[in-house]
Image: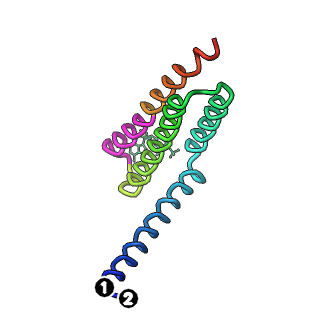
Amino acid sequence: MDSKDKIKVKSNRRFRKSFTHAVTGVKTAILEERHMRVHIAAGMIVIMCGVFFRVTKIEWLFLIFSIFNVLTFEMINTAIERAVDVATEDFHPYAKKAKDVAAGAVLLASICSAIIGLLIFVPKIF
Ligand SMILES: Nc1ncnc2c1ncn2[C@@H]1O[C@H](COP(=O)(O)OP(=O)(O)OP(=O)(O)O)[C@@H](O)[C@H]1O
């Protein structure tokens, strides 16, 4: 094996390791965060409604993006919460701000998803 191949193997191994860590992160969020499981359940209901109402390809794109957008923000929120918890166990105004702003990001993503869901499904129901 020449040095170029060795570098390739090393970089593949590094990529696999990073991927494994990322999958562990998703698993941890699902197993340990109740909010994450609530968002997943909501996403599944949306997917079932999408199948039931036979939404178009463009509508599927918006729905799938909305579902993953909320899950992504929830995971970032969890990461910020844990990082803040490591940084301080005491009450700190900056800790409060960091956690509240992170939670606010999830709220905005959820509102955006709710609007998209309403725009897609309400005309199909009424
Ligand atoms: N160290 C702290 N200093 C100041 N305020 C805090 C601190 N930790 C938490 N808070 C406040 O309490 C709120 C709830 O924090 P907490 O860490 O319990 O998150 P949570 O929203 O209940 O999520 P989870 O249940 O996933 O932990 C925060 O949004 C923040 O306003």
Residue for badge 1: 3
- The answer to which image quadrant residue 95 occupies is top left
Return the x and y of residue 45 as percentages of the image width and height: 65, 33
Q: Amino acid at mark 1?
A: Ser
Residue for badge 2: 1
Q: Residue at x 37, y 41 (%)?
A: 96
- Relative side of 102 to 60, left or right: left
Instruction: Tell which of 110 and 43 is nearer to you.
Output: 43
Return the x and y of residue 108 as percentages of the image width and height: 42, 30
Instruction: Tell which of 46 and 7 is nearer to you.
Output: 7
Task: Quote the CA–CA distance across marks 2 and 1.
Answer: 7 Å
Query: Secondary structure beneath disc 2?
Result: loop
**Mark 2 Cβ and ligand 1 under 8 Å apart:** no
Is residue 93 in the magenta section? Answer: yes
Instruction: Tell which of 45 and 51 is nearer to you.
Output: 51
Q: Residue at x 50, y 57 (%)?
A: 25
Residue 119: which numbered mark, if any? none
Q: Which residues are magenta?
A: 91-106
Return the x and y of residue 82 as percentages of the image width and height: 44, 53
Query: Secondary structure beneath disc 1?
Result: helix
Q: Residue at x 41, y 68 (%)?
A: 15
Q: Amino acid at mark 2?
A: Met
**Relative to 83, does residue 13 appear above or below in the rendering?**
below
Is residue 123 in the magenta section? Answer: no
Mark 1, residues whose alpha carbon is within 10 Å: few (<14), some, or many (≥20)? few
